[in-house]
Image (cartoon, rainbow, N blue to C red):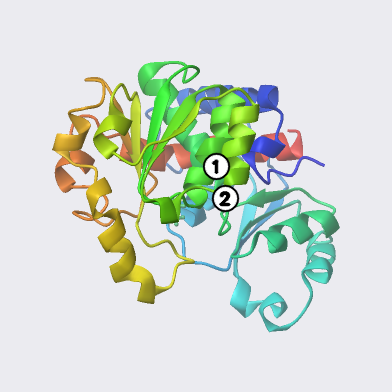
Amino acid sequence: MNHFLDIHKTDATELRNIIDQAAAMKAARAGQPKGTPDAEQPLKGRMVALIFEKPSTRTRISFDVGVRQMGGETMVLSGKDMQLGHGETIADTARVMSRYVDLIMIRTFDESVLTEMSEYADVPVINGLTDRTHPCQIMADILTYEEHRGPIRGKKVVWTGDGNNVCASFLHAAGQFGFDLTFTGPAQLDPEDEFVGLARKAGSTITIERDPVKAVEGADLVVADTWVSMHDSQSSKERRHNMLRPYQVNDALMAHAKPDALFMHCLPAHREEEVTSAVMDGPQSVIFDEAENRLHAQKAVMRWCLGV
Ligand code: CP
C-alpha cells in the first residue's frame, strides 16, 4: 500500500520520480485554462475523500482541482461533521471509508490520527498536514526550487523562525534529496531532535545557528513560516512574537544570502511579521509558484499512491 505519510517514510528514488512526473505533468498542461482536463485521465472512475479537521485554502483547492484534472471525483469532508468528530473510532472510520473511496487525504491535529487511519484503511492515505509534519508542501517546494534553479542536491536551505511541522518536513527532505539545512531561531522553538538526527544520519549537514545573519550567509534558499501555527495557542502569540522578531526575513537579512537566493513561504503569511512585503513581493520570492506547485506535486503523489 503506497501511503504518503511523510517524506522520510517514502523511498528517495520514488520521491525523485514523483517530482519528475509532477514537472512533466505541469509542462504538459502549460498555457491551458485551469479547467482543461489532462490528456491522460489516470483517476477516471476514482473517488477521493479529502478530510479537513483544520482550516485550509491551498491544500483543499489544489487537491480538489488536481483530482478533477485527472478525471476523478472528490468529496470534501469536515472532520467535525463526520461521526469521527463525535466518537466513532478512527479505525472504524478508515474501514468504512475504504468501502466507498479509492484514496483518502486527511489534514488533522495529532499524527496518531493519520497513522491509525493508514493502519486500518484498505486504500492509500495521504498526509495533508498534522501538527508534526507537512510533506505535500515540501514536495511542492522541491519542485519549485528545481524549476527555478536546477537540482537542489548540495544546496544550502535556511529555515528561519519556528522549527514547526513544515520545518520538520524540510528536514526529512534534506536527508532524502541531499541538501543541507540551517535552522535559525530561538532555542525554545528548535526543531525536534529526532528530525535533526534523521537528516544527519542520511548525510545532510544540519546546522543550528542563533544569529540569523550568520545563518543566511551563502544560502541558496531562505524559508519563513508563520510564527503562530494552527496548533499553537493564541495566548502564546505575544511571547512567540517577542522571541521571533529578530528572525524576520527582510531585505537586510536577504542581502546576506547568495545574490540569486530564492525566498519561500508556504502561506498563509502574516505580512510585516515573519516576512516583509518587500521580500514577499520582491524578485527573489517564488511564493505563488510554490502555491501553484501544490497542485502539480500532489497530482504526482496521488498517481504514485494509486499506481496509475
Ligand atoms: N500551505 C498550506 O498548507 O496552505 P493551507 O493551510 O491553506 O492549505
Rendered position, 196 above or below 186? above
Q: Nearer the viewer, residue 173 or 72?
A: 173
Q: Quadrant of the N terminus?
A: top right
- Quarter of the picture containing the C terminus is top right
Residue 157 location (% of width, % of height): 40, 29
Q: Does residue 24 appear anywhere in the picture? A: yes
Left or right placement of residue 153 versus residue 183 in this view? right
Q: Is 177 placed above or below 54 here?
A: above
Three-letter amino acid code at the position of disc 2: Thr
- Residue identified by numbered label 1: 169
Q: Quadrant of ligand 1?
A: bottom left
- The image position of residue 49, as x and y in percent, is 66, 58
Could you tell whether 142 is left or right of 91 in the image? left
228 relative to 46 in the view: left or right = left
Estimate the spatial distance between the alpha carbons at disc 2 and disc 1, rounded to whole Å: 5 Å
Do labels 2 and 1 touch, CB within 8 Å? yes
> Which amino acid does the dot numbered 1 rest on?
Ser
Task: Name the residue at 31% across, 67% down.
Answer: 239
- For disc 2, the marked residue is 133
- The foreground one among 150 and 273 is 273
Disc 2 residue lies near ligand 1 with CB under 8 A: no
Question: Relative to residue 169, is residue 92 drawn left or right?
Answer: right
Identify the element where label 2 is drawn.
loop
Using the image, determine if residue 146 lies above or below residue 225.
above
| Circle on res. 211 | none
Q: Earlier in the sequence, mark 2 or mark 1?
A: 2
Q: Residue at x 40, y 24 (%)?
A: 156
What is the total number of numbered labels drawn onto the structure image? 2
